[in-house]
Image (cartoon, rainbow, N blue to C red):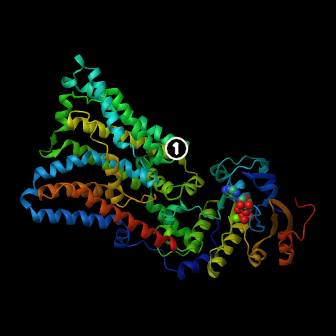
Amino acid sequence: MSELLLDAKDLVKHYGSVEALRGASFQAFAGEVVALIGDNGAGKSTLVKCLSGVQQPDSGELRFDGKQVVLDSPTTARRLGIETVYQDLAVAPDLDPAANLFLGRELRKPGLLGRLGVLDKAAMRRRAITEFSQLGVRLQSIDAPIGSLSGGQRQSVAVARSVVWASKLVFMDEPTAALGVVQRERVLDVIKKVRDAGMGVVLISHNMPEVLAVADRIEVLRLGRRVARFSGSDVTVEQLVGAMTGALSQEDAA
Amino acid sequence: MTTRSESTVDIANGDVEPTRRSLWQRVSGSNTVWIALVLVALIVVFSIARPDAFLTLFTAQTLLIEAAVLLVLGVGMTFVIITSGIDLSVGSVLIFAGVMAAKTMEGLSPRSDSTGAGWGVILVGLLVALVSGGAWGLVNGLLIARAKIPPLIVTLGSFGAALGAAQLITDGSDVRTVPKALARTLGSGTSLGVVPNLVILAVLITVVGDLVLRTTRFGRYTYAIGSNEEAARRAGIAVTRHLVTVYLMVGVLAGLAGFMSLAYFRTTTISGHSTDNLNVIAAVVLGGTSLFGGMGSIIGTVIGIFIPAVLTKGFVILHVQAFWQPIAVSAVLVAAVWFDQVRRRARDQS
Ligand SMILES: Nc1ncnc2c1ncn2[C@@H]1O[C@H](COP(=O)(O)OP(=O)(O)O)[C@@H](O)[C@H]1O
Ligand SMILES: [Mg+2]
């Protein structure tokens, strides 16, 4: 078994009177794709936000790489090597794909100009073209605002941004929702590559065949709590749906 | 990512590399080009109608001088509007800074008459103008970015408060003594024979503002925050600090504009800037900067400043009633915002 990367225990998160997480636990291992599934409103996106520093859980315990951590901001999570594709994408629609890829990590010119904050746009554009083509992201133009691209292309850019910068763990919250068949295959290929490079991938998806195709492990969330865990090789769609709807539950999962 | 597998090769072979858009594609997609054409057309029309009166050095000089103060305000306003904010307080802050500077210079002069004051006193005056402008900017920024009060409300408040404070300090009547040395150099002096010093200062500020916005990380973050504040935050950008800095910068620029206005008019012109804010906002938006944030340019603002200015001059020369000017400007403004909105809607549907 590969090493335990992320270990979240009993996370609780309220939004006003809404209890989005009610003692949710979750684990991710290095070199593994774990699918996080659950019905709409089960708390998957909330869990991802708590585990990537965008939101802070009201209570619960978080260990990363064996050490207890507090993810008080996305920057803290990113410093630990955690990258995230958010369900709402979180891209800047008026900026071009290269600018979005490097958002918050801009390359600066060497020397005095760089110290004055001057960007090295050419270098970023070159590197972006390389990364995009290596990840199979097709874009007609590298300097059109990303808002003018198709939903699928925007999603591909968000996926590319996460895997380019991650060093340990990548969360992907429904990364294939807006994609066509070909693009979807590409993203699944990318996910496998990232895993084979030794990183952990957390995939959220409503597409069961997709989950069964790439996931090494599956954790099921229901009403803000983990209700089941499966190994990816010996599970059926019926079992997954049963766990998501509450028809099936495992005593030891929570 | 560190893995580079063989499968990527066929992608590179099979696909076209993403290209850069042609200059024309990039340029025609923005309002700025169209509005620039409007400006050129106006100049051509007025020049043909009255070449003797419109195409003169004097017209050019007064046009530029009158635009200089607005331009300095416009540079700051462009940054603010790109963050999807607004600053209604610039005109009042300009007055407040001018009053503070003038009062300080008087206070440092014998018998409260600063006419004969030297450069030491003038420099202190400049510093006071910048600091008092910056103070209002800082207050605006903190209330907007930290306390999360909408910029429209915050700056509407400081619009009233800064003017009120200026009137309290002066008892409502203008400060009338200004150092001669200042008025003769910055106020009405020229360099290279014909170029007004005020204009040189405004151009300098404009060029620096343009470079910061287009080429630096500060500029990039300004666009990113206006485009999607939450995305910027999640990308690790210190959004709150950046917004405070932007409003602080606008305040400092308004302070400088106040000092320039003081040098030019040789008095504090307390009642003369009540519509500066709207004129500047109109200019920035005319120039293609989107009120929704994320998009805009300094060059656009320069063009947007000159359209109303040229219209005014042209109407005077052609003996058209001056009351037509605001009507014409407003029509162009509404059209510009409408185009912006239509274009955004078309884009967001894709
Ligand atoms: N920002 C928010 N404010 C209030 N309620 C929220 C917010 N985000 C999520 N919720 C609520 O929390 C619950 C879990 O939502 P979410 O994590 O998005 O579920 P999922 O991603 O599994 O569909 C839902 O009931 C949702 O309405
Ligand atoms: Mg969700």
Residue A125, above or below B199: below
Left or right, A101 with reference to A42: left
Left or right, A15 with reference to B56: right
- The amino acid on which the numbered mark 1 sits, given as a three-letter code, is Arg
Screen quadrant of the N terminus of chain B: bottom right
> Would you name the residue on which mark 1 appears?
B241
Residue B31 in the image, given as x and y percentages of width and height: 35, 66
Chain to which mark 1 belongs = B
Q: Residue at x 11, y 49 (%)?
A: B58
Residue A55 or B265: which is nearer the viewer? Answer: B265
Ligand 2 resides in the quarter of the picture at: bottom right
Residue B63 in the image, given as x and y percentages of width and height: 19, 51
Residue reaching furthest to the left: B52
Residue B107 in the image, given as x and y percentages of width and height: 29, 20
Q: Residue at x 36, y 61 (%)?
A: B288
Q: Residue at x 32, y 57 (%)?
A: B299
Residue B41, above or below B116: below
Q: Kindly tell me whether residue A59 is visible in this rendering.
A: yes
